[in-house]
Image: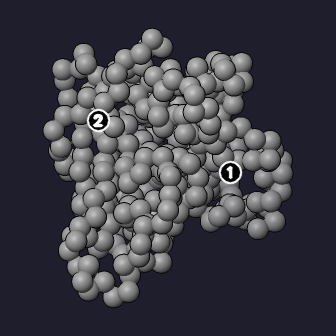
């Protein structure tokens, strides 16, 4: 899994540098983190800067691997649990893509979230999950386009060109006779659906994307998404939206939410606009905000399914009833 060679479809090879631990990753005694930067052959500079938009073909990206330590296993107070049988995408690995949303776009989405939540408060409308969640259908057309671009032109294209083995799993390809070197998103779609655009058969889950707002003292308890692939994008700290605390905590796969302790996890706090990709079977949490406000854009990827969607009118009616 260390590298993928070029093929006729134009997939880009990826080669890791020596393991590095950026300042935005913090491990624990029980779970440490290994981190590698993957660069294309022609890349001679460091990771994409915060001012340059992510290029799914040419930009560097990080792979964070969760490593379980033997420290404390003799005295686990009943929390040591066996790793459950699983065939997930990115097993105990998290991909981090720099700047899939620019700082200006992060600010625009955060401002739009404040507008939506103020309107909800004025109308006494609660969101689907809490009063601090803003759903995709409520955002301006401009910000919806940003979210659509993030999925199609950044994440899906990245998976197609840089992680074809993950792209194949997302599309549930079952053809064992197919040549792995040609099993990209585009080739699979052309063979199976007669389509060449991944966005034609792939979509957000019906209630995504959402932006979650955390005020001081707020957090999101350890949980599992139970979806193939989740994307979390911190939208701040930014000018006008300072932040102290927060971040996304991950636990070694097989740790159930009820057994997840903060001192045992790995905390990720990448810069605003960076995408964190992980499989939905990894227990994770939104850590408590100490001061300021935290905004996080979250969505999951699924194959398009009419049963997975509700229209905007139906969603608004449901919101009003809560």
Residue 232 in the figure: left or right of residue 123: left
Q: Pointer 2 and pointer 1: residues touching (CB < 8 Å)?
A: no
- Mark linked to residue 17: none
Query: Residue at 48% across / 72% down in the picture?
Result: 257
Task: Please name the residue that numbered disc 1 is placed on.
Answer: 207
Give percent across and percent down for residue 57: 39, 21
Query: Residue at 84% across / 51% down in the picture?
Result: 314
Query: Residue at 36% across / 58% down in the picture?
Result: 247
Task: Please name the residue that numbered disc 2 is placed on.
Answer: 2
Q: Is residue 115 above or below residue 76?
A: above
Q: Is residue 27 above or below residue 210?
A: below
Secondary structure category for the residue under label 1: loop
Dot 2 or dot 1, earlier in sequence: 2
Classify the position of the C terminus by image quarter: bottom right
Q: Is residue 175 above or below residue 237?
A: above
Q: Using the image as rendered, state which of residue 283 and residue 23 is in the foreground.
A: 283
């Amino acid at each position: 899994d260390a590298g993928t060679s070029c093929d006729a479809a134009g997939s880009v090879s990826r080669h890791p540098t020596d393991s590095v631990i950026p300042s935005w990753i913090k491990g624990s005694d029980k779970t440490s983190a290994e981190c590698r930067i993957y660069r294309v052959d022609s890349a001679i500079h460091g990771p994409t800067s915060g001012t340059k938009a992510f290029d799914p073909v040419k930009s560097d990206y990080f792979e964070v691997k969760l490593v379980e330590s033997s420290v404390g296993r003799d005295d686990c107070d009943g929390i040591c649990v066996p790793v459950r049988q699983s065939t997930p995408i990115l097993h105990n690995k998290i991909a981090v893509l720099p700047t899939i949303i620019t700082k200006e776009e992060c600010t625009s989405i955060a401002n739009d979230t404040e507008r939506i939540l103020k309107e909800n408060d004025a109308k006494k409308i609660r969101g689907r999950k809490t009063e601090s969640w803003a759903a995709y259908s409520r955002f301006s057309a401009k910000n919806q386009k940003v979210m659509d671009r993030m999925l199609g032109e950044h994440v899906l294209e990245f998976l197609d060109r840089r992680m074809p083995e993950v792209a194949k799993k997302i599309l549930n390809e079952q053809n064992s006779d197919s040549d792995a070197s040609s099993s990209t998103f585009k080739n699979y779609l052309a063979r199976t659906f007669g389509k060449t655009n991944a966005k034609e058969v792939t979509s957000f889950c019906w209630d995504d994307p959402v932006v979650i707002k955390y005020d001081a003292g707020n957090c999101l308890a350890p949980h599992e998404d139970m979806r193939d692939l989740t994307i979390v994008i911190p939208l701040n700290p930014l000018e006008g939206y300072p932040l102290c605390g927060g971040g996304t905590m991950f636990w070694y796969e097989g740790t159930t939410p009820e057994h997840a302790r903060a001192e045992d996890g790995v905390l990720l706090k990448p810069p605003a606009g960076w995408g964190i990709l992980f499989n939905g079977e990894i227990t994770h949490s939104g850590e408590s905000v100490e001061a300021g406000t935290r905004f996080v854009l979250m969505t999951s990827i699924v194959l398009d399914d009419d049963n997975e969607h509700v229209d905007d009118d139906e969603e608004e009616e449901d919101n009003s009833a809560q």
